[in-house]
Image (tube, rainbow, N blue to C red):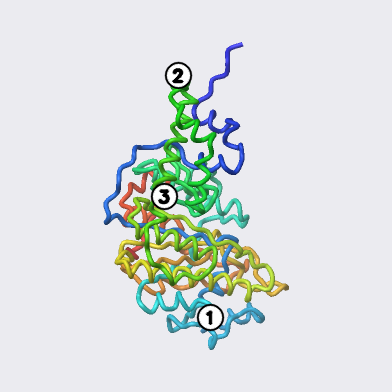
Amino acid sequence: MTPKKYNRRQFLKNSSLISAGSIMTPLFLSPFSHAHQPLTSSQKKLIIIQLSGGNDGLNTLIPFRNDFYYKARPHIGIEKNNCLPIHDAYGLNPEMKGMEAIFKEGDALIINGVGYPDPDLSHFRSTDIWQTASQSDQFLSTGWIGRFLDQNSQSNHMALEMDDTLSLALKGHNNRGFATSNPQMMKRSLTNPLIQHSLAHHHDHDHNENISYLYKTLIQTHQSADYLFEKANVDTQMSSFPNTKFANNLKQVAQFIISGSDTQIYFVELTGFDTHFNQQARQGKLLKTYSDGVHALRKELKRYGLWNDTLVFTYSEFGRRISENGSKGTDHGTANLSFILGGNLHKKGIYNEIPSLKSRDNNLTHSIDFRQIYATILDKWLEADTQKIIDGSFDQLDFL
């Protein structure tokens, strides 16, 4: 029988080293890619924040002049006197004082009614749709940031996720982002004697293409880990960040940007937004965590003169139903809002109106396709070839 041949992707997928334990796992979060080419200090940074679980947009930006809002939410509706007004008809959740300050200083924009046709209300499927920029009936194996890396990658850590596993959004055909929640811990894991021995003897396997490729991946990952460890330990004074996991992740992002890291894209997740019951307190706590974190991020980047070259884009995989449920919560819904933060926005405040609350199916109808936001960011901020990254033609928005 003819021996079965494996290509590199199959070899990596089936290699036992990939699942050999927590120490080895981070080594294969990004494949061997282009040689390191430092980026210029003026290159713009993009920070993507996913509010996972389906954040309730109607209790994030409250339409306090809309009587139907209070009729639909007799127990969880937030009264006008408790809102943080940022518009004559809208106010922020009372826990979002940090975000209120960003709005008042003109560095924030809310885009309402963001979604896509034929929405899927499954957490997993809707997350995949957002992360791959696919149609609702289209299944893609690469993410929109991953495809950007395929076209533009200049280093193994051009896109960095603050987590121990890599999201689909950052996986491309040939290039991937890098994932680590703790550069110091990753650096320590790479001092494992087995890994060091492998690095020292990688030339012993140059005759085997698959093994050689695996060692090249290990070497490149080791180099990226060294680089990120170095940047994570540059002496910068940052005292504004709250003591939460989310804020600590943003503090690490700020550390990388301030230290001059050539990482251009950062991906951060805040979980827990699936508020089917007792929503007010649970969502309020999460929104405070988010709001205080981004407020501290902005403060530090402004202090170092880097805020104008940074764009923060926040989304959730779907919204919630218009009416509250019987458990003082909300169930999975469709269209939602997105936040755009930065020092160079062409539009600020409220981009468009919240969709009508008088819906037959208790859902908000989307007016902005989320891929319009992606196309705008790719073209106007990252200066990428949008047509090679997103399938289809989507009108860009004018916030940049």
Q: In this view, does 350 lie to the left or right of 181?
A: left
Q: How crowded is mark 3: few (under 14 residues within 10 Å), some or many (20 or more)?
A: many
Q: Mark 1 points at which residue?
A: 94
> Which label's residue is closer to the chain start, 2 or 1?
1
Mark 1 secondary-structure assignment: loop
- Report x, y in % for residue 112: 47, 68
In the rendered image, residue 124, in percent from the top left (x then y), is placed at 60, 52
Q: Nearer the viewer, mark 2 or mark 1?
A: 2
Dot 2: within a 10 Å radius of its alpha carbon, few (fewer than 14), some, or many (20 or more) residues?
A: few
Q: Distance between the residues labelled 2 and 3?
A: 31 Å
| Residue 313, quarter of the rendered image | bottom left
Q: Position of residue 236 (x, y in %)?
A: 37, 63
Q: Quadrant of the N terminus?
A: top right
| Three-letter residue code for mark 1 | Pro
Q: What element carries label 2?
A: loop
Residue under circle 2?
A: 207
**Residue, disc 3:** 228
Image spot of residue 204 (x, y percent): 46, 22
Earlier sequence position, callout 1 versus callout 3: 1
Q: In which quarter of the image is residue 398?
A: bottom left
Q: How far apart are marks 1 and 3 (CA)?
A: 37 Å
In the rendered image, which quarter is residue 59 located in? bottom right
Residue contact at pointers 2 and 3, CB within 8 angstroms: no
